[in-house]
Image (cartoon, helix red, strand yellow):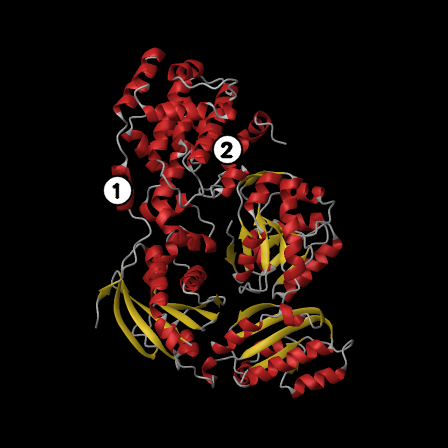
């Protein structure tokens, strides 16, 4: 009797998740210092420190000059960028940049690239600002919460990219999303992992709470956080229903919880001019 | 986008907002073709997770539906919507949409010929009288018991009585229904449904490869449900005569049920009878007559005269079959597999208690049948990922096992495709006991691989 262990690997395990978290680099010193100065609302010092990080400079320059931000003239100097954005949006932009440090150089599961991922960040950022303005909310950390939302996409890519065929086969017999697959296999979902990323980078706890509520399956007991979670969940699916992101395979990577957002839908439709 | 295919119904699940731009990106003709190739005879788009849609958004789907219908005759439409969405769609298409609408996926399944849980008590209502009649006929033909409410009041009154009906249908609309020859399995008989005018087109709509493969894997009785056939011409006559001759070498029987010869020459019936085809007026004349079923070869497949040996190509590709199976079970259970034994002989199952099985056939460049024998604990564990919770419901476990073996079949198809070997897969089949499996596989020689998953013995058997 032969006794051979087959070479096939399991889909995803707790170890896969832990190894992913371990591989996340700590936030660079220049970024930490920039965020500290932004927290103290000192834009001049924040810009001076941020200048040392060439990659951050290049990122900010590329993203704020996207048409969706609507600036008439091109801005390149980081002090100019911070000046135009103000404290809250600058903090949000730095967090957006931190997320890009996590994104892969080559996307396999989703048909994304550097440019389309930046577009996704930019669209979410601009629309989130619109929502917070509508809700009369002025809070740096709540504004920055949107930066963490694409972490769920990056985590999906990292965990599932080598299992595309298995996932596709599984999904051909059952309408099951990546978040549910992960939860059933490891008792931890994409938003729990996003929270662990936020903790590793010392992001404000409120950001993690909003992100968890925005999953649509874990409503928060805090009414304000829950309300923001609903708006963010609906915003995510509004954005992922755009053809560029459908083409990228993002429309059904997590489950849209229609009932969770039903009570805010009319407001959302008016705000986003949907007809 | 990929569709989920269950019981012959392929459903796409878009989410969020559907407008002219997004719906064009969500679905392509290629996606639909791939779904049809995966044994679907109904193509639907679920609106369950769609919060907003406009006419432009639906129109893109509808154009594709019409294209598919004109070539494939499949049933196409939308499902999983509430009253508000239903009313919006009816308004967009002036109350006469050129596609079907099913309030839920489950209701759509009742209209699929592939759905095997028959005899459901169904209450139905539609404001449109002809729709009420059309639905009742379709449901009756599919083996259900439809009860038609003649008014809204009657419908509301009856639907309030708990536990009387298995399903309640309203807000549902049958557009142009499929004319494809759908097949379903009842016990060891395969029932094909044919309707309207049978002419040369039957050669295109009847899946000959599926039929031949069903012969190969042991099916011996084929029943054509011909209640809705109006007439038959000489091209169709030739087609059925040839089908009967080709089945003769397998000792197969072909029957026609419910066919009237009011508009078809009676000489056609004689010609078909000469080819060995039998005629019955009612389906129950065959299915409820156990002795007759036995004589016709449908009580057991052991009557098979053609025993087909495992050939070289099957042996060469064996690692692909095993890898596909092991990878799937490992994926579903998150447990490692240990291969214990590989031997070529008739199937041997040591433990018969608490053991269930499933099988799937493949055909094309090579053909055969994969049989998977599960101890109940592995079956339950493997189904947990798809069901989302532990269950003791054997019917649910068997249904989910069918999905699992479908995944194995899909994986085999991909792995063989990578090597330039093209195969299609049949519908999966499940067996609630070892005895029911042995009726099909007892006298078949094949390759048996015993595997251990968490100390539970699992049997993989590959035969032709």
Mark toward the start of the polypeptide (2 vs 1): 1
Whether the residues at callouts 2 and 1 have beta carbons within 8 Å, the answer is: no
Disc nearest the viewer among 2 and 1 = 1
Looking at the picture, does residue B364 appear above or below residue A170? below
| Residue A122 spot, x, y in % from top left | 46, 28
> Could you tell me how many numbered marks the image carries?
2
Q: On the rendered structure, is A209 left or right of B13?
A: left
Mark 2: secondary structure: helix
Q: Position of residue B96 (x, y in %)?
A: 73, 49
Q: Quadrant of residue A196?
A: top left
Say which residue appears at 56% left-offset and 85% top-offset.
Answer: B248
Q: Observer-nearest residue: B115 or A253?
A: A253
Q: Residue at x 41, y 34 (%)?
A: A150
Q: Is residue B73 visible?
A: no
Establish if B248 lies above or below B183. Answer: below
Q: CA distance from mark 2 to mark 1?
A: 31 Å
Q: Say if residue B200 shows up in the picture.
A: yes
User: Mark 2 = which residue?
Assistant: A234
Q: Position of residue B185 (x, y in %)?
A: 53, 70
Q: Residue B311: which disc?
A: none
Chain assignment, label 2: A
Residue under pointer 1? A19
Chain at tag 1? A
């Amino acid at each position: 009797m032969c006794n051979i262990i087959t070479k096939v690997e399991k889909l995803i395990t707790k170890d896969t998740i832990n190894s992913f978290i371990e591989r996340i680099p700590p936030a660079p010193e220049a970024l930490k210092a920039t965020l500290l100065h932004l927290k103290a609302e000192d834009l001049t010092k924040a810009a001076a420190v941020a200048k040392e990080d060439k990659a951050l400079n290049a990122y900010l320059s590329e993203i704020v000059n996207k048409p969706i931000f609507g600036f008439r003239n091109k801005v390149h100097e980081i002090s100019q960028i911070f000046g135009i954005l103000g404290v809250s949006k600058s903090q949000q932009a730095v967090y957006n940049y931190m997320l890009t440090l996590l994104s892969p150089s080559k996307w396999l599961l989703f048909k994304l690239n550097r440019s389309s991922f930046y577009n996704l960040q930019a669209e979410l950022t601009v629309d989130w600002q619109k929502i917070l303005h509508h809700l009369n909310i002025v809070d740096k950390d709540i504004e920055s919460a949107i930066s963490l939302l694409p972490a769920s996409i990056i985590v999906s890519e990292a965990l599932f990219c080598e299992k595309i065929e298995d996932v596709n086969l599984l999904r051909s017999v059952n309408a099951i999303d990546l978040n549910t697959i992960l939860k059933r296999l490891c008792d931890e979902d994409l938003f729990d992992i996003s929270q662990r990323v936020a903790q590793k980078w010392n992001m404000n706890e409120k950001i993690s709470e909003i992100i968890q509520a925005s999953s649509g399956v874990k409503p928060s007991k805090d009414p304000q956080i829950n309300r923001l979670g609903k708006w963010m969940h609906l915003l995510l699916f509004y954005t992922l229903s755009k053809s560029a992101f459908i083409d990228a395979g993002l429309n059904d990577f997590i489950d849209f919880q229609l009932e969770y957002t039903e009570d805010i839908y009319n407001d959302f439709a008016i705000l986003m001019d949907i007809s | 986008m990929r569709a989920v295919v269950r019981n012959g119904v392929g459903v796409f699940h878009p989410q969020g907002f559907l407008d002219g731009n997004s719906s064009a990106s969500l679905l392509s003709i290629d996606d639909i073709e791939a779904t049809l190739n995966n044994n679907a005879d109904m193509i639907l788009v679920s609106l369950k997770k769609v919060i907003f849609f406009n006419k432009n958004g639906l129109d893109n789907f509808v154009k594709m539906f019409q294209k598919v219908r004109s070539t494939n005759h499949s049933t196409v439409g939308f499902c999983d919507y509430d009253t508000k969405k239903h009313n919006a769609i009816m308004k967009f298409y002036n109350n006469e949409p050129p596609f079907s609408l099913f309030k839920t996926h489950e209701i759509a399944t009742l209209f699929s010929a592939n759905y095997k849980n028959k005899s459901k008590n169904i209450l139905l209502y539609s404001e449109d009288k002809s729709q009420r009649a059309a639905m009742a006929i379709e449901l009756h033909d599919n083996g259900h018991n439809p009860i038609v409410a003649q008014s809204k009041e009657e419908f509301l009154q009856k639907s309030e009585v708990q536990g009387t009906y298995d399903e309640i249908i309203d807000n549902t609309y049958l557009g142009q229904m499929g004319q494809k020859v759908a097949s379903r399995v009842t016990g060891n008989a395969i029932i094909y449904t044919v309707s309207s005018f049978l002419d040369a087109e039957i050669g295109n709509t009847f899946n000959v490869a599926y039929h031949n493969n069903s012969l190969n894997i042991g099916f011996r009785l084929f029943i054509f449900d011909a209640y809705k056939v109006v007439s038959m011409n000489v091209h169709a006559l030739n087609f059925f005569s040839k089908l009967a001759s080709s089945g003769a070498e397998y000792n197969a029987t072909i029957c026609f049920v419910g066919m009237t010869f009011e508009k078809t020459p009676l000489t056609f019936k004689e010609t078909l009878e000469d080819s060995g085809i039998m005629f019955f007026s009612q389906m129950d004349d065959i299915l409820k007559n156990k002795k007759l079923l036995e004589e016709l070869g449908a009580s057991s497949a052991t009557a098979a005269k053609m025993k087909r040996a495992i050939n070289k190509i099957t042996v060469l590709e064996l690692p692909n079959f095993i890898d596909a199976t092991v990878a799937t079970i490992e994926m579903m259970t998150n447990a490692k597999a240990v291969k214990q034994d590989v031997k070529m002989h008739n199937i041997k199952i040591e433990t018969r208690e608490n053991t269930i099985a499933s099988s799937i056939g493949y055909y094309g460049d090579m053909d055969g049948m994969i049989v998977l024998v599960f101890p109940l604990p592995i079956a339950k564990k493997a189904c947990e990922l798809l069901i989302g919770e532990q269950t003791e419901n054997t019917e649910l476990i068997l249904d989910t096992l069918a999905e699992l073996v479908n995944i194995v079949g899909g994986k085999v198809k991909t792995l063989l495709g990578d090597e330039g070997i093209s195969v299609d897969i049949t519908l999966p089949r499940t067996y609630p006991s070892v005895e029911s499996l042995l009726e099909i596989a007892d006298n078949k020689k094949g390759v048996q691989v015993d595997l251990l998953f968490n100390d539970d013995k699992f049997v993989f058997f590959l035969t032709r």
